[in-house]
Amino acid sequence: MTAEAPARRTPDPASAPAADAGKERRQADRIEAWSIAWMLLAMMMWGCFAFLMLSDYGPQSGDRALCRGPLVRPVSESSLCRDELRQWPALLGVLALAAVVTVVAAATTVYAKVLSRLAHHEPPGARPRD
């Protein structure tokens, strides 16, 4: 070995678990942020579905809209109440998207909790703290 060549350091075996634990915690935090984002998206999708099902729409007739929401009253046969988003195929599509996003949010939340628990778990053979 010459004096000009940089000396290579071998990794300290005691610091390796600490570095892995920090990496696992960062990954758990990142997945937890994604789970929060999925949860917010799921709530927005369910809110959109509830709005489409319950709110009145169409031209004004007196003090309220002419057409009632599909959940409140059956769809009117009037040509003024023909809104594509208020028809059942579109409503079922919004419902399906809301359900899929909810399942992804739940799965991501569970995965984030498991990663968090694993990051804080002591390795086998570690001495208990006093």
Image (cartoon, rainbow, N blue to C red):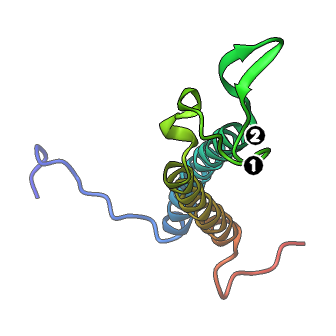
Question: Foreground: 51 or 1?
Answer: 51
Residue 27 x %, y %: 52, 56
Q: Earlier in the sequence, mark 1 or mark 2?
A: 2
Q: Quadrant of residue 53?
A: top right
Residue 54: which disc? 2
Q: Bin the neighbour count of mark 2 within 10 Å (Cα to Cα): few under 14, some 14-19, many 20 and up.
A: some
Residue 111 x %, y %: 60, 68
Total marks in image: 2
Residue 90 x %, y %: 50, 49
Left or right: 45 as drawn, with respect to 60: left
Considering every residue shown, the one lying at the far bottom of the view is 125
Q: Bin the neighbour count of mark 1 within 10 Å (Cα to Cα): few under 14, some 14-19, many 20 and up.
A: few
Q: Amino acid at mark 2?
A: Leu
Residue visible at 60% across and 67% down? 107
Q: Provide the secondary structure element on which disc 1 rests.
A: loop
Look at the numbered discs 1 and 2 and tell me whether their residues touch, using CB distance below 8 Å.
yes
Task: Using the image, determine if residue 30 lies above or below residue 65.
Answer: below
Task: Using the image, determine if residue 48 lies above or below residue 101.
Answer: above
Left or right: 80 as drawn, with respect to 70: left
Considering every residue shown, the one lying at the far front of the view is 78
Q: Which residue is mark 1?
A: 71
